[in-house]
Image (spheres, grey):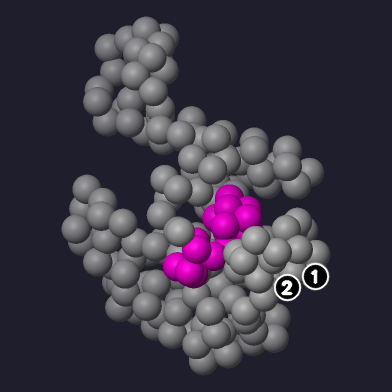
């Protein structure tokens, strides 16, 4: 591992940032400026998993992710949004299975380092914090009489749009897929917080 003059871990030259769901993997490839803080966003994309149940999707994920990593010659390091508890324990368990398949494929492709970050950490870093109470009140005043689930969906979509707008502004892109934008956000955070991503810097 390379450290800077302050003793902090520097990221490797190429990092694959991943936002995984139970049905797909969104990725963003970043290259650093010879180990310095500074990054370039390269190829981005999305891989969909097929299958009639989660186990078929896990198998498909393993095959497709291995093929994807082999195509790019493997990556020394990957950073992934780690599984957090959700409203649905089943969804959390299914996502853990998918992430296991992804990381297993990464290991087979030669990946040596896995970084991780919670959703709220990288979202806060790019200024996309949880919707405030004042914002919630304003949304409700503009859209009265809706259900609780409607407001939650609206707020979730609003934050997704903010991430897309941030990434497109910072990297001069025209990304319109929110999962791909999330992968970019994960990588953007990781390249400036690599030691935290791999658990060596506090």
Q: How far apart are the alpha carbons under marks 1 and 2?
A: 6 Å
Badge 1, how many Cα within 10 Å: few under 14, some, many 20+? few
Q: Which residue sits at x=32%, y=27%? A: 150
Instruction: Say whether residue 135 is visible.
Output: yes
Could you tell me if the residues under marks 1 and 2 are in contact, i.e. CB atoms within 8 Å?
yes
Give the residue number, with chain letter if any, for mark 2.
13
Q: Secondary structure at mark 2?
A: loop
Percent position of residue 56, x then y: 34, 79
Residue 113, label in figure: none
Question: Looking at this view, is 178 or 122 the one in front?
Answer: 122
In the image, what residue occupies the spot 55% across and 85% down? 112
- Secondary structure, magenta segment, majority class: helix
Which label belongs to residue 34? 1
Q: In the image, which residues are magenta?
A: 183-201
Q: Residue at x 55, y 35 (%)?
A: 127
Is 76 on the left-hand or right-hand side of 55?
A: right
């Amino acid at each position: 591992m390379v450290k800077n003059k302050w003793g902090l871990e520097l990221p490797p030259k190429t990092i694959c940032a991943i936002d995984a769901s139970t049905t797909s993997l969104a990725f963003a490839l970043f290259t650093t400026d010879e180990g310095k803080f500074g990054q370039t966003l390269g190829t981005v994309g999305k891989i969909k998993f097929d299958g009639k149940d989660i186990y078929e999707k896990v198998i498909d994920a393993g095959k497709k992710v291995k093929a994807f990593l082999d195509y790019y010659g493997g990556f020394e390091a990957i950073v992934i949004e780690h599984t957090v508890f959700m409203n649905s324990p089943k969804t959390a368990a299914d996502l853990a299975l998918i992430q296991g398949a992804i990381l297993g494929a990464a290991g087979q492709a030669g990946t040596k380092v896995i970084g991780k970050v919670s959703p709220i950490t990288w979202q806060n870093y790019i200024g996309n914090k949880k919707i405030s109470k004042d914002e919630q009140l304003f949304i409700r005043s503009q859209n009265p009489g809706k259900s609780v689930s409607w407001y939650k969906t609206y707020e979730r979509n609003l934050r997704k749009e903010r991430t897309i707008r941030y990434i497109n502004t910072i990297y001069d892109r025209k990304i319109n897929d929110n999962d791909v934008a999330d992968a970019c956000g994960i990588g953007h955070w990781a390249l400036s917080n690599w030691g935290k991503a791999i658990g060596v810097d506090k």
